[in-house]
Image (cartoon, helix red, strand yellow):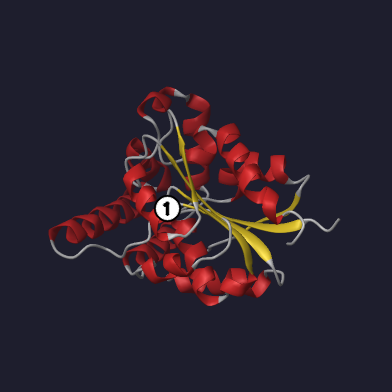
Amino acid sequence: MVKTSLILVPGLLCDEVVWAHQSDALAGVADVRVATNGARDTLGAMAESIIAQAPARFALAGHSMGGRVALEVVRRVPERIVALALLDTGHLPVAAGDAGEREVAGRLALVDKARREGMRAMGREWMQGMVHPTRLADADLVSTILDMIERRTPELYAAQTQALIARPDATPVLTSIRCPTLVLCGRDDAWSPPRRHEDIRDLVAGSVLAIVPECGHMSTLEQPAAVTTALREWLEPALDGG
């Protein structure tokens, strides 16, 4: 049996480490690849890079910013996607008014901190709202995240931040999706909360929502086994057709 091709898309500043458990656990049933977003400054450019290297048909999972990139892939080549998973992500553009201005200012302030004090120092501040509060004392988890961030540069961070600031509205994409779709997030995700994923679930016909308990935004690292189980169940219908 030919394995389904599965492309995993990391989020902001993340690399293959963020998908390590899922990559290893699903390798027996899928041809797993982890995308590289690089220093591209639009989500569309990130999506185009994935499309250029992807097989004719493939399953696609994106975490955080990677979920937004995945939606841009779907916008361009919906007929090639056999299954879609959106983890700890969102679909709306930057809000109008004060809320949007605060988001943009906060993002740019962190980029400035990275340039002034280094990526690891920025990462310590960034991750405060990104993992479940009880996991901030988990030295292994914290080191894994900080090491991953430190492998990136302020220039790459600035480019990816610009991509997020200029993110398009993906609502029309969600309402057009017809492939099996998993929507997943940590119950305690403060950045992309469950209510946002309920909205996504409601927009995607036939989609399934999974809420992971005792988990913040970095679900693939915080609760890797639970996320892998959900992905395996989501992928099963596509195993014969990728």
Q: Residue at x 37, y 61 (%)?
A: 91
In the rendered structure, the answer to whether residue 46 lies left or right of residue 19 reads left
Examine the rendering and report whether any part of residue 69 can be seen: yes
> Which quadrant: the N terminus?
bottom right
Residue 18 appears at what percent x and percent y?
56, 44
Locate residue 35: give its quadrant.
Answer: bottom right
Q: 79 and 155: which one is in front?
A: 79
Q: Residue at x 39, y 48 (%)?
A: 118
Residue 183 appears at what percent x and percent y?
48, 49
Residue 150 appears at what percent x and percent y?
48, 46
Label 1: few (<14), some (14–19) or many (≥20) C-alpha neighbours in 10 Å: many
Q: Residue at x 37, y 67 (%)?
A: 171
Q: Where 22 falls versus 81 (above or below)?
A: above
Q: 63 and 178: which one is in front?
A: 178
> Which quadrant: the C terminus?
bottom right
Residue 127 appears at what percent x and percent y?
38, 39
Please tell me whether mark 1 sits on a helix, a strand or a loop. Answer: helix
Q: Where 223 falls versus 65 (above or below)?
A: above
Furthest residue toward right: 1
Q: What kind of residue is marked 1? A: Arg
Furthest residue toward left: 98
* Numbered circles on residues, count: 1
Q: 111 and 66: which one is in front?
A: 66
In the rendered structure, the answer to whether residue 213 lies left or right of residue 49 reads left
Residue labelled with disc 1: 201
Examine the rendering and report whether any part of residue 39 can be seen: no
Locate residue 31: give its quadrant.
Answer: bottom right
In the rendered structure, the answer to whether residue 37 lies left or right of residue 167 reads right
